[in-house]
Image: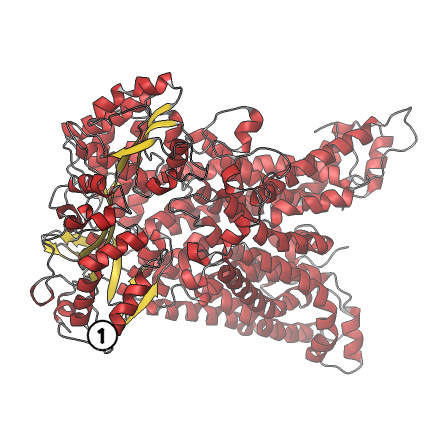
């Protein structure tokens, strides 16, 4: 997980401690603090190792084992033995027993699930960013009832996703309110694009508030004087937005987008409950869960692939797009 | 977008208008749109929860055919609904997860916020990375492991994987809070002869209580809302509310009991919403902590 | 500088992770041929546990009490699982994998029997533990048989029925084509003609198998090999696809599960409905909730030239190979499938019996008027594929039938994809 960080870590290490009231030997002080830090960090690191590293290592080991197969002679299942990369080629190259996986197998759904996952991620995150930005700007203004609006946006955020899924499933039912309101007769969960949009709309409803609040927090760090000065210089509203608001909000915005993207890539609850993955709404996470009952080891390979995909996306964000969540969290206080 | 993106956080442009203030009106209209968008679906859930099953798909804005039956269905054991049990299970799992994450995480957060040591960046990177870990990558190996050691369906089978996302969240949020605290007090305590440990216990812990409480709420909500892990690793006896709602049984076999599900959703949601509204400011601070500083 | 100290936590974590992963045993489903276990404890007697899903209509408890009163030294403890089928399945798998000796007699859905048998978890019912099924309806016995050996005792059954509006159609159709020709009546009355369950879930496998089987097709053959790629299967599935195309099945039926289709029927929106017997009482309620309360009748599913081939629901009773008291378990299974018990299932729980004689028993038909029709349905029924790969097979059927019904794929293509997808299960 942290392999991307060593040289940064070295760069960050000599940073000044938060406050250094008395000038005792800085070296000695660092040693004491270091000892304290390791004592305080050990429980967390051990716990995370147990709940994350152990399962990951276990999953990787499993993914190189073949699933139990039926011995046609006896009619009984038998242990699979080592599989090499078979479980991976099964998913990535759609290989089912030496032939290409036919439609109606889980294997054949891999690339569909991959593109569905990315579709959901790109569309929901884009929508949530734009809507969230707009909401944040409104909430940043002062008007009577502002705190009511800020409280209201927390409501969708607080509702469990499972409940959200059921709620929107009901809204999008054939006899449901969505069709009545718009006078349509759409079978929302009955075909591909309506089903996808139903998921996108529900997800947007549920998570835009999170986005809006993060962006709002970023907006509030911009001093009013900057805008005043720009106004005096005759900047238009659009110029002020693109040249002041955007660049100054960018760090907060990138972190928000990073969090939401990684969250969207593992989307499970909404499509699983709303459509059971039918009509091409199966995400990678749903595919893994479907596979668990057809064979642990193959599922382990798929979950490892999912993990690597998410890791790569996170890497790209942090490395090339400058979403520096770690930096934000470790930088020493403000001012 | 462009037009509205003018003046974050400034007071409404005063003076310079003649007659009606269109800008302010636009703000109010926008605010109303946000309110409607966020609240109406939730309102619809509550309205439906009070509708008689036979009128499930009525579309009147106000509740009609009002009944408490759906709430009775939710708790009706003879239908196979054990919602009371589910609520207790959710409390146990979310409570235990939060407790473990807080007790362990508070020390790590203190170290990260307060102490200067090598590999701080790497440690924070690891912890943050952990929070982004996909749940399915845990479920598959744990499904097998817990089956082998007979933990399947136990409380710990949910609490342990839940820690994988609550603990990083806790550490991350607390670290940001801790950096904001008046640490001078700790220094003065040390001058008064306290060791760093004593200072931590006697001065810092009480000071950190509000931040810790907010973090606890966030962690609790996260664990309370968890679905994927619970749907795979819980059993009848330990099933939490989120999974129960997804698999709700109606009065008849094969029935999709919309109204009862909405009633259950209402029961689960109302306490969370109250919690969130009461601690609104703190929660917003906790959510955004770390992301902007 | 003292770097070691800082590396310690990481090292500890790493070592811990590695040593723990060694305990995981490297994965691989734990399977057993079961030979040894199946030969053990055949004469064992003593207390046992009976495991079943949610006892919704209080059928099991009175039976267990009755057994316990008569067998004080071989008491049965009832372990009740949840209502959700998937979770019952997982619970059984977990306990079998753990070789749990406390799951002596288990209640398994007909579609899981082959899987559990192939995993070596079920006691074959032969020799010392043989079980007499001669009085039972043959189709139900088939669901309990894997590789020629009986692995479970049929307990309850279920079959599809055709619900029709007798006020509009005085004589129910005997064949599918006859039913389709009656759709003009539906049109005149401004209602939909036919519906079953076509949402992409287990119900679609049921409906698609019925169409395929009714025209003489098969999903898998007797040895469990894929055998669906036939002209008969294509004709059968084609009938459903045609009905969707020409509107005899309304478009919204593609989202129907049992309840959606029942609601449509009892709201008077459908002329014909394929559904399970449970609908009979609900649609017949005279409290105003059903608009068709006294206007509907039931008939066997229409087929190619006579009654169609219904899919079978229901449950079987099986004995765990890990049970310590197999003699008691066998006696209990016999008790739980006796004529008296089967009658009780029907009267108390509206569960269809597996004994053919009971369907004409007047004490039952007075309460469950649909029984004679249901008997025809079950007599003509063909079980859903008996295969240890049931999840993969049902997915192959569902996915491809769904694509065909929606017109995304030709019937020929769908059936041949079904064939290859079933073959791909290993």
Judge whether residue B161 can be spotted in this image: yes
Report which quarter residue B208 is drawn in: bottom right
For disc 1, the marked residue is C71
C205 on left or right of B161: left
C132 on left or right of C247: left
B37 on left or right of C123: right
Chain under disc 1: C
Q: In this view, which residue lies farthest toward the left?
A: C127
Q: What x and y, as percent, mark residue C229?
A: 16, 32
Q: What x and y, as percent, mark residue A141?
A: 79, 39
Q: What x and y, as percent, mark residue B41?
A: 60, 39
State the residue in front, C70 or C93: C70
Q: What x and y, as percent, mark residue C365?
A: 24, 46
Q: Secondary structure at mark 1?
A: loop
State the residue in front, C193 or C129: C193
C245 on left or right of C387: right
Badge 1: how crowded within 10 Å, few (<14), some, or many (20+)?
Answer: some
Tell me what residue is drawn at x 73 percent, y 77 percent.
B202
Report which quarter residue A94 is drawn in: top left
Q: Is residue A245 above or below residue B289?
A: above
């Amino acid at each position: 997980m942290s392999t991307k960080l060593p040289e940064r870590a070295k760069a960050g290490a000599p940073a000044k401690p938060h406050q250094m009231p008395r000038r005792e030997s800085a070296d000695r002080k660092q040693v004491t603090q270091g000892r304290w830090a390791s004592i305080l960090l050990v429980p967390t690191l051990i716990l995370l190792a147990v709940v994350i590293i152990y399962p990951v290592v276990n999953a990787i080991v499993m993914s190189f084992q073949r699933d139990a197969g039926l011995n046609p002679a006896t009619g009984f299942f038998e242990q699979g033995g080592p599989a090499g990369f078979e479980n991976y080629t099964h998913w990535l190259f759609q290989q089912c027993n030496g032939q290409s996986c036919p439609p109606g197998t889980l294997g054949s759904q891999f690339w569909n699930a991959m593109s569905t996952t990315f579709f959901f991620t790109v569309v929901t995150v884009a929508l949530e960013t734009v809507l969230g930005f707009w909401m944040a700007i409104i909430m940043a203004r002062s008007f009577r009832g502002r705190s009511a609006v800020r409280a209201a946006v927390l409501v969708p955020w607080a509702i469990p996703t499972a409940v959200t899924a059921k709620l929107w499933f009901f809204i999008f039912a054939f006899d449901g309110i969505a069709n009545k309101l718009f006078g349509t007769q759409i079978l929302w969960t009955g075909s591909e694009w309506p089903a996808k949009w139903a998921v996108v709309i529900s997800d947007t409803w549920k998570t835009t508030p999170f986005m809006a609040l993060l962006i709002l927090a970023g907006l509030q760090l911009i001093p009013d004087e900057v805008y005043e000065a720009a106004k005096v210089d005759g900047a238009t509203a659009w110029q002020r937005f693109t040249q002041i608001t955007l660049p100054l909000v960018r760090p907060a915005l990138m972190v928000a987008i990073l969090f939401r993207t990684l969250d969207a890539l593992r989307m499970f609850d909404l499509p699983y409950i709303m459509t059971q993955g039918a009509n091409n709404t199966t995400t990678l996470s749903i595919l893994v869960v479907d596979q668990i009952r057809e064979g642990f080891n193959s599922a382990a390979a798929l979950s490892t692939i999912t993990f690597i995909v998410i890791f790569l996306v996170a890497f790209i964000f942090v490395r090339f797009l400058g979403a520096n969540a770690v930096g934000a969290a470790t930088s020493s206080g403000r001012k | 977008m462009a037009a509205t993106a003018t003046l974050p956080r400034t007071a409404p442009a005063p003076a310079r208008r003649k007659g009606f203030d269109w800008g302010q009106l636009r703000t109010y209209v926008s605010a109303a749109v946000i309110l409607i968008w966020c609240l109406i679906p939730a309102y619809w859930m509550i309205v439906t929860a009070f509708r008689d099953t036979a009128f499930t798909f009525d579309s009147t804005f106000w509740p009609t055919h009002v009944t408490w039956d759906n709430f009775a269905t939710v708790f009706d054991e003879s239908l196979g609904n054990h919602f009371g049990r589910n609520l207790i299970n959710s409390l146990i799992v979310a409570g235990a997860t939060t407790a473990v994450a807080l007790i362990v995480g508070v020390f790590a957060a203190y170290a990260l916020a307060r102490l200067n040591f090598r590999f701080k960046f790497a440690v924070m990177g690891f912890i943050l990375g952990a929070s982004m870990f996909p749940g399915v990558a845990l479920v598959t190996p744990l499904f097998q492991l817990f089956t082998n050691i007979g933990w399947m369906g136990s409380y710990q089978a949910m609490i342990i994987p839940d820690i994988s996302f609550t603990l990083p969240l806790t550490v991350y949020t607390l670290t940001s809070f801790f950096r904001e605290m008046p640490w001078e007090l700790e220094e003065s305590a040390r001058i008064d002869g306290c060791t760093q440990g004593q200072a931590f216990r006697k001065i810092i812990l009480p000071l950190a209580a509000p931040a810790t409480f907010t973090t606890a709420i966030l962690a609790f909500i996260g664990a309370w809302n968890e679905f994927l892990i619970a749907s795979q690793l819980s059993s009848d006896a330990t099933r939490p509310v989120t999974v129960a709602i997804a698999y709700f049984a109606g009065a008849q076999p094969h029935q999709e009991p919309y109204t009862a599900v909405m009633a259950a959703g209402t029961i689960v949601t109302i306490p969370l919403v109250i919690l969130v509204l009461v601690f609104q400011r703190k929660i917003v601070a906790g959510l955004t902590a770390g992301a902007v500083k | 500088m003292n770097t070691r100290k800082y590396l310690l936590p990481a090292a500890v974590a790493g070592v811990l992770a590695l040593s723990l992963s060694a305990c995981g045993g490297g994965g691989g489903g734990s399977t057993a041929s079961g030979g040894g276990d199946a030969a053990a404890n055949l004469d064992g007697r003593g207390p046992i546990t009976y495991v079943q899903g949610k006892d919704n209509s209080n059928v099991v408890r009175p039976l267990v009490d009755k057994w316990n009163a008569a067998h004080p030294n071989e008491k049965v403890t009832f372990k009740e699982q949840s209502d959700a089928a998937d979770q019952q399945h997982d619970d059984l798998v977990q306990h079998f994998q753990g070789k749990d000796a406390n799951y002596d007699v288990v209640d398994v859905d007909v579609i899981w029997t082959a899987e559990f048998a192939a995993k070596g978890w079920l006691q074959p019912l032969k020799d010392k533990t043989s079980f007499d099924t001669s009085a039972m309806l043959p189709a139900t016995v088939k669901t309990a048989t894997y590789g020629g050996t009986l692995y479970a005792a049929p307990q309850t059954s279920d079959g599809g029925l055709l619900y029709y509006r007798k006020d509009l159609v005085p004589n129910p159709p005997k064949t599918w084509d006859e039913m389709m020709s009656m759709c003009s009546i539906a049109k005149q009355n401004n209602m939909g003609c036919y519906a079953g369950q076509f949402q992409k879930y287990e119900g679609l496998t049921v409906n698609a198998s019925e169409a395929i089987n009714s025209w003489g097709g098969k999903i898998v053959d007797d040895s469990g090999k894929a055998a669906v790629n036939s002209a008969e299967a294509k004709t059968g599935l084609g009938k459903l696809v045609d009905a969707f195309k020409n509107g005899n099945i309304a478009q919204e039926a593609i989202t129907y599960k049992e309840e959606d289709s029942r609601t449509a029927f009892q709201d008077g929106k459908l002329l014909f409905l394929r559904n399970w017997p449970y609908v009979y009482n609900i649609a017949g309620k005279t409290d105003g909730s059903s608009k068709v309360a006294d206007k509907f009748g039931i008939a066997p599913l229409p087929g190619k030239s006579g009654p169609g081939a219904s899919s079978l629901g229901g449950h079987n009773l099986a004995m765990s190979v890990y049970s310590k008291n197999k003699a008691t378990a066998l006696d209990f299974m016999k008790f739980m499938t006796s004529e008296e018990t089967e009658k009780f299932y029907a009267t108390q729980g509206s569960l269809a019996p597996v004994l053919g004689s009971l369907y004409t028993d007047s004490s039952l038909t007075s309460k469950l008027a649909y029984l004679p029709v249901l008997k025809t349905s079950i007599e003509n029924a063909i079980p859903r594929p008996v295969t240890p790969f049931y999840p993969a097979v049902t997915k192959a059927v569902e996915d491809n039938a769904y694509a065909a019904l929606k017109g995304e794929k030709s019937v020929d293509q769908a059936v041949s994809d079904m064939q290859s997808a079933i073959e791909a299960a290993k």
